[in-house]
Image: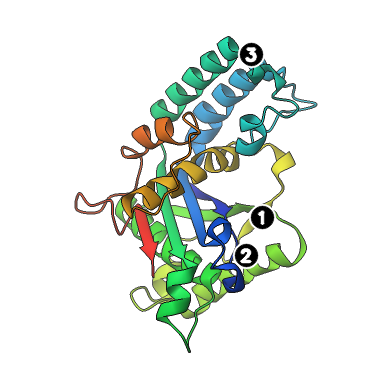
Amino acid sequence: MNKYRLYIDETGNSDLSSSEDPNHRFLSLTGVAIELNYIKSEIFPELEQLKSKYFRSHPDEPVVLHRKDMLNQKHPFETLGDEKIRNEFNNKLLSLLGKWEYTVITVLIDKLEHRQKYTTWQFDTYHYCMMILIERYVLFLEEKKSTGDVMAESRGGKDDRRLKDSFERLLQTGTEFVSPERFRQPLTSRQLKVKPKMNNIAGLQIADILAHPSRREILMDENLADDRKEKIFSDEIIKLLNGKYYQKNGRINGYGKKKLP
């Protein structure tokens, strides 16, 4: 039986009081499900080879890919300031992201709409997104007749505790559509794994690269996107994402891509 891991990246924050600020209106969670033997044998070595070629990554001092730092060409990504090198790296990265086998699930919540719709009852937006994300991951595991666990990037302190509490609550209470027993059956751990970025975990780096473009695609679907650039990290990646989203009965919307409320 195959074992998968869902690597989660968060974009935005869950603070409802900031929902009227256009820069903080949306919260999204993107999960990337990858079979663990595959990430070990294929993705990790190929990703390390890419980083070694362009950023001199070394096992003793590994380079960890981070979308914002790459976009802004911050250390150790200064070489991306050279247009020729940047284009070459971008093309290679896109080729790998298109070739690798993984499944993407993104849940986005419009906090302003959520706040306006539920004036007296306001579900915790982070837990709401986590609930929908893990619910679909369980459906994915059931279809694959596989087991799996879940990992998120550490943000430290209270944020990590919030992540873990939200996950544990799901497994205790279930949801309207999935019972606690059904959640627990394919999930091999009742605890969310939380690891820091510096641990050089390939799945978390892929989730980091895909999260913003996937969020942008959902906003574009809803005519809510602000139309700024970022070709490599948005529009080019969006083109390949449609072949990577989780689908059920041929449908992506509602499964691989879900907008709330």
How far from the left and from the top, in percent, is residue 100? Answer: 43, 30
Q: Amino acid at mark 3?
A: Asp
Q: Quadrant of the C terminus?
A: bottom left
Residue beneath disc 1: 194
Q: Is residue 256 left or right of residue 15?
A: left
Check contact, mark 2 vs mark 1: CB within 8 A: yes
Check contact, mark 2 vs mark 3: CB within 8 A: no
Q: Is residue 177 above or below residue 216?
A: below
> Looking at this view, is 137 or 197 the one in front?
197
Residue at x 69%, y 53% (from the top left corner):
154
Front: mark 2 or 3: 3
Residue at x 59%, y 12% (from the top left corner):
85
Check contact, mark 3 vs mark 1: CB within 8 A: no
Residue beneath disc 2: 163
How far from the left and from the top, in percent, is residue 42? Answer: 50, 27
Badge 3 or badge 1: first in the primary sequence: 3
Q: Amino acid at mark 1?
A: Val
